[in-house]
Image (spheres, rainbow, N blue to C red):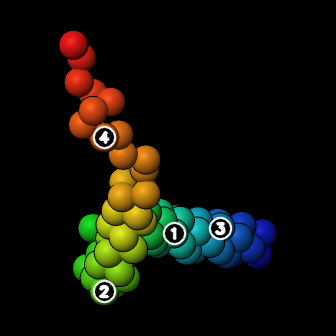
């Protein structure tokens, strides 16, 4: 009777360990995919294009709004 209970406990522990290992593997895979930009781009290409376009606009505004020096200021005589 005691060995049957011990066998049941060992079986339950092994099953629980296997479930935990499977869950951990699944979580690792999800985490790896959530930080991989390639996977994110494949699932949301329009978002990446939108962000790229917005960054391009921002960069052009910064460059174009910078004070320009006239040619006379750069002439060294």
Residue in the picture at 31% in, 86% down: 46
Mark sitting earlier along the chain (3/4):
3
Measure how far apart labels 2 and 4 are at the Cα level.
Answer: 41 Å
Q: Secondary structure at mark 4?
A: loop
Mark sitting earlier along the chain (3/2):
3
Q: State which mark lies toward you, 3 or 2.
A: 2
Measure how far apart labels 1 and 3 are at the Cα level.
Answer: 21 Å
Rate crowding at label 2 as few (under 14), some (14 to 19) or many (20 or more) other CA atoms within 10 Å: few
Tally the numbered discs. Answer: 4
From the viewer's perspective, tell me whether residue 76 is left or right of residue 5: left
Q: Quadrant of the C terminus?
A: top left
Q: Position of residue 18 (x, y in %)?
A: 52, 69
Mark sitting earlier along the chain (1/4):
1
**Can you identify the residue that label 4 sits on?**
70
Q: Secondary structure at mark 1?
A: helix
Measure how far apart labels 3 and 2 are at the Cα level.
Answer: 47 Å
Q: Position of residue 68 (x, y in %)?
A: 36, 46
Q: Which mark is residue 46?
A: 2
Q: Secondary structure at mark 2?
A: helix
**Can you identify the residue that label 1 sits on?**
27
Q: Quadrant of the N terminus?
A: bottom right
Mark sitting earlier along the chain (1/2):
1
Query: In which quarter of the view is residue 39 placed?
Result: bottom left
């Amino acid at each position: 009777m005691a060995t049957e209970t011990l066998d049941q406990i060992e079986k339950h522990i092994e099953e629980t360990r296997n479930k935990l290992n499977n869950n951990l593997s699944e979580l690792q895979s999800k985490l790896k995919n959530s930080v991989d930009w390639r996977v994110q781009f494949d699932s949301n290409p329009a978002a990446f294009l939108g962000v790229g376009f917005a960054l391009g606009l921002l960069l052009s505004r910064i460059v174009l709004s910078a004070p320009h020096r006239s040619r006379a200021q750069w002439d060294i005589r």
